[in-house]
Structures are given as structure tokens and as C-alpha cells.
Image: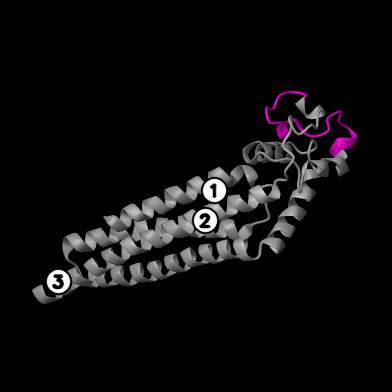
């Protein structure tokens, strides 16, 4: 039962993370993050499926089915712990190797900024990023001066850079009106928080599942002694 709940929890959390992050997908070249979340959802689904079979084996006290259940759960637990560790390792890379990661994010953000005002999905994502992270541009607000969008706009910066966004508010680039810090740091913090949550949840659930695994072994011994 606890294994099934943990499987459902992983599917729900993984799906929520993908949906929550979806608005920034177009801005970030971070396939490893998607892979970690995808594995989390996949593992959760497999756990629910295996546990359904395990419940049948428990009710019927079918020894060989319980053995198969135990082996599959052990394999899933190993994979789950590995994914949790990977999440923490990547978070450590964000903390330790901040310069290379920041450089990659700068490159990606700058590349997407060139599509601002041209592609609706990119424009929406950048606006949402600047509003959510209370930032403006790549390194700082002046990054917008070098974009194609600036050449065809009367604004100094997009309206989403304003502390109180409204139509045309981006014409004034005074510090009292717009956020002047860049968005790269905000994206980095975003990754750190999500990886910390994913890693903690995966390893925490793994501990609960380990208890369930021990209980399965005890049940298996009982069935063996009974028969």
C-alpha cells in the first residue's frame, strides 16, 4: 500500500514539475532536467503497476509471485535511488560549476531574445520569466539594446521588465520603473530549487519503500514457513 502511494506521489510530483516548468521549456537547453523528471514519472508508474501485482500475491499468499514482486521492487528501488543521487549531483554542479552553467544559460537566453517579438511562444516565455524572476534581459536590462526587437520598438525594454507592468511602461528605463538585474541568476536558482525538491522526495520515498521491502521479506518468510 505504501509503495503504491509512493508511486502515485512520484507521478503527481513529476507531472506537476513538468507543467510548472513548461512555460520556460523554450528558453532552457536542459535535457538532463527533463530526463530526471521523466524517469521519476516512469518509475512511479512502474511502482504502481508492480504493487498491483504484489497486492494480489499478498492476498493469495503466492510465494513465487511474492519473490518476483520482491526482485522487481529491489530493481526499481536501485534505479530510484540512482535518479535521486543524480538530481543531487546536478544540483551540486549548479553550485560548484556556476560559471560554465551560467555561460550556457546566457547563450541560450541571448539566442531566444533575438526571437522576442517574432515568435509568440518565445515572447510569452520571456515575459513570464521576467515577471516571475523580477529581472530584465540576460546580464542586465541593457542587453535589450543589442536586440532586433529594440530597433523596431519605441520601448527601452519590454513592458514585462517593469516593476508594475502596464502597456508602454517599458519606455522609461529609470531604476524606479524597471528591474535592472539580469535573468540568468534567476534561472539558475530555479534549477537548484527544483533539483533539491526532486532529489529529496526521491530519496525520502526510497526510505519508505525500503521499509516496505523489509516487510515483504518478512511476509515471504512467513509464507515459506507456513507451507
- Using a 10 Å C-alpha cutoff, classify the residue at mark 2 as few (fewer than 14 neighbours), some (14 to 19) or many (20 or more): many
Question: Could you tell me residue 181's position as x and y percent?
Answer: 72, 43
The reply to whether residue 183 is in sight is yes
Q: Is residue 53 left or right of residue 227?
A: right
Query: Marks 3/1: CA distance?
Result: 42 Å
The residue sitting at the top extreme is 167
Task: Say what secondary structure mark 3 lies in.
Answer: helix
**Farthest left residue?**
226
Residue 127 lies in what quarter of the image?
A: top right
Residue at horizontal 19 percent and vertical 71 percent from the top: 218
Q: Is 209 placed left or right of 79 in the picture?
A: left
- Which residue has dot 2 on it? 37
The location of residue 80, given as percent across then percent down, is: 43, 65
> Residue drawn at (38%, 60%), measured in percent from left and top?
204
Horizontally, is 17 left or right of 66 in the view? right
At horizontal 33% and vertical 72% (from top left) the residue drawn is 71
Q: Looking at the image, is 72 positioned above or below residue 36?
A: below
Main SS, magenta region, reads loop
Q: Is mark 2 on a helix, strand or loop?
A: helix
- Inspect the magenta stretch and tell me whether residue 2 lies in it: no
Q: Report the disc number at residue 223.
A: 3
Q: Earlier in the sequence, mark 2 or mark 1?
A: 1
Q: Give the vertical position of 176 relative to 200 (above or below).
A: above
Q: What stretch is highlighted in magenta?
A: 149-168
Which quadrant does the C terminus fall into?
Answer: bottom left
- Name the outermost residue toward the right: 151
Query: Residue 73 location in percent, x, y?
Result: 34, 67
Would residue 227 be seen by someone viewing this image from the given angle? no
Q: Residues within 10 Å of mark 3 (few under 14, many from 20)?
A: some
Instruction: Give the number of the disc on residue 18.
Output: 1
Query: What SS does tag 1 mark?
Result: helix
Amino acid at each position: 500500500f505504501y509503495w503504491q502511494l509512493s508511486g502515485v506521489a512520484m507521478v503527481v510530483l513529476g507531472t506537476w514539475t513538468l507543467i510548472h516548468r513548461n512555460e520556460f521549456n523554450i528558453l532552457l537547453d536542459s535535457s538532463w532536467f527533463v530526463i530526471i523528471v521523466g524517469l521519476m514519472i516512469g518509475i512511479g508508474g512502474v511502482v504502481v503497476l508492480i504493487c498491483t501485482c504484489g497486492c494480489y500475491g499478498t492476498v493469495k499468499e503466492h510465494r513465487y509471485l511474492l519473490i518476483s514482486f520482491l526482485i522487481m521492487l529491489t530493481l526499481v528501488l536501485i534505479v530510484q535511488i540512482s535518479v535521486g543521487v543524480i538530481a543531487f549531483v546536478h544540483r551540486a554542479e549548479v553550485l560548484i560549476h556556476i560559471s560554465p552553467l551560467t555561460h550556457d544559460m546566457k547563450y541560450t537566453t541571448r539566442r531566444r531574445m533575438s526571437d522576442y517579438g517574432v515568435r509568440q511562444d518565445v515572447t510569452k516565455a520571456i515575459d513570464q520569466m521576467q515577471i516571475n524572476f523580477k529581472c530584465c534581459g540576460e546580464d542586465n536590462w541593457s542587453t535589450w539594446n543589442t536586440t532586433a526587437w529594440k530597433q523596431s520598438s519605441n520601448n527601452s525594454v519590454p513592458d514585462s521588465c517593469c516593476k508594475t507592468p502596464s502597456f508602454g511602461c517599458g519606455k522609461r528605463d529609470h531604476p524606479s520603473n524597471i528591474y535592472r538585474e539580469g535573468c540568468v541568476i534567476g534561472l539558475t536558482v530555479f534549477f537548484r530549487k527544483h533539483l533539491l525538491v526532486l532529489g529529496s522526495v526521491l530519496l525520502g520515498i526510497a526510505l519508505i519503500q525500503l521499509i516496505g521491502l523489509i516487510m515483504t521479506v518478512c511476509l515471504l518468510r512467513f509464507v515459506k514457513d507456513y507451507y
